[in-house]
Image: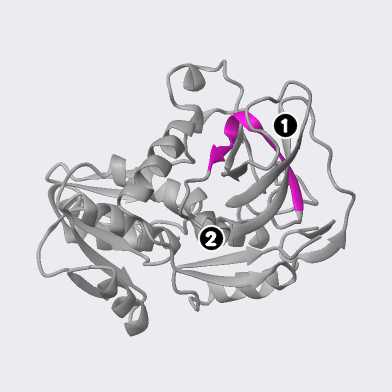
Amino acid sequence: MRAMLLDAPGRPLRLAELPRPEPGPGQVLLRVRACAVCRTDLHLVAGELPDPALPIIPGHEIVGTVVAAGPGATRFAPGTRVGVPWLGWTCGTCRFCRSGRENLCDAARFTGYQLHGGYAEYTVADERYCFPIPEGYSDVHAAPLLCAGLIGYRALRVAGEGTRLGLYGFGAAAHLISQVARHEGRRVFAFTRPGDTTGQQFARELGAVWAGGSDDLPPEPLDAAIIFAPVGALVPAALRAVGKGGVVVCAGIHMSDIPSFPYAILWGERVVRSVANLTRQDGEEFLALAPTVPVRTTVQPYPLEAANAALDDLRAGRVAGAAVLVMGEA
C-alpha cells in the first residue's frame, strides 16, 4: 500500500510503499477513503509534540470501509463505513478511565501519533474506538467531523451555555462548531488573523454576527471564547473580550507560550481552561447531533501524495474549512 511517512520531525513526509497491515485482536482493517488534515499534524511534523512513535503514518480524521476483522472483533461487518478519531486506545482501569475521563488516561495512545494513522491506503484500528459514519455525508465531507468536529464539540460544551461566543481562529474546527452554536441559539463572533478579510467573510457566510481580526475587541462583551489558533498571545486578548464570569477555552493540543497579563483581566471570576483530547462519548454525541443541525463541512481535497502541500497550505492559512486527503483506488 502507499502511505505518507514521517521519518523525523522537521522533515517533509515521504511517500512509501509498505505492506498492508493485518488486524490484530479486537482490530479492524480499513480501506481508507479520506483523511482530513489537522493542525495537530502540523505540530507533529514540526516536532512540537513529545515522543511520537517514529517512523509514523500521520492522520487521525479517518473515514474508511471495513475490509477484515481480527480475532474477537465483531462490532462491524465487512463493508461498514466507520470513522477513526484521535483517541485510539486507553487502559480502561486508571482513575481517569473509571470516572468518565478517558481523554486524560496517562497510558492513552493516539492515532497518527503513537498508532499509525490515515495518510495511507489502509490502516488498522481498535474497533472500540471507531464510530459509524452518519448517512448523508460523503467520505470527504465526513472526515473533518472526526477531530475538528469532535474537539470543537467538546470545547463548546466546556465553554458553558452563554449566548455570546467568540471563536479565535476560524478554520476547520470553528467553521463546524459555529454551526452547532447557531443551531443552539448562540451568537457567534469570529476572530481571524488581522487583515484576513477572506476568512472574515467566510465566517459571516456561516452566520457570524461579527467578524474581525484577533487584535480587535468585539462590539460587546462575550460570555465565552474558544481559542483554536495555537497562539498563546490570544489568551489575554480573549480575556479582555469576555465579560465577568466569562470562560476562555484553549482547544489545541499545542500552543505557544502565554505572555504575562494583568490580574485585572482575569478578575471578575473569569476562567481560563484547556480541552485535552476527546472521549468516545463526545464522538457518539456529536456524530448523532451533526446530521440534525445539519453541520455542513467545507473541504479542500488533495490526493494522498500531496499531503505535504496540504500541510503547507494549512500552515499558511490558505485553506477555507478543512483540507482532506482523498485516496485513489488501490
Q: Residue 227's x, y, as percent? A: 35, 57
Name the residue type under label 2. Answer: Arg
In front: 124, or 275? 124
Q: Main secondary structure of the magenta part?
A: strand
In front: 268, or 312? 312
For the record, the magenta segment spans 122-132
Q: Residue at x 11, y 60 (%)?
A: 221
**Is 35 covered by the magenta stretch?**
no
Q: Quadrant of the N terminus?
A: bottom right
Q: Residue 304's x, y, as percent? A: 71, 67
Q: Circle 1 sits on which residue? A: 27
**Number of residues whose C-alpha sits closer than 10 Å to that of mark 2, classed few (under 14), some (14–19) or many (20 or more):** many
For the residue labelled by badge 1, is the local secondary structure a helix, a strand or a loop? Answer: strand
Residue 13 visible in the displayed image: yes
Q: How much space separates mark 2 and mark 1, taking CA atoms? A: 27 Å
Colour scheme of the picture: one colour
Q: Is residue 90 above or below residue 138?
A: above
Left/right placement of residue 244 relative to residue 29 reads left
For the residue labelled by badge 2, is the local secondary structure a helix, a strand or a loop? Answer: helix
Left/right placement of residue 326 relative to residue 5 reads left
Which label sits in the foreground, 2 or 1? 1
Q: Circle 2 sits on which residue? A: 39
Name the residue type under label 1. Answer: Gln
**Number of residues whose C-alpha sits closer than 10 Å to that of mark 1, classed few (under 14), some (14–19) or many (20 or more):** many
Which corner quadrant of the image does residue 207 belong to?
bottom left
Q: Residue 176's x, y, as percent? A: 37, 58
In front: 47, or 314? 314
Instruction: Name the mark on residue 304.
Output: none
Q: Is residue 117 above or below residue 171?
A: above
Q: Residue 282's x, y, as percent? A: 42, 37
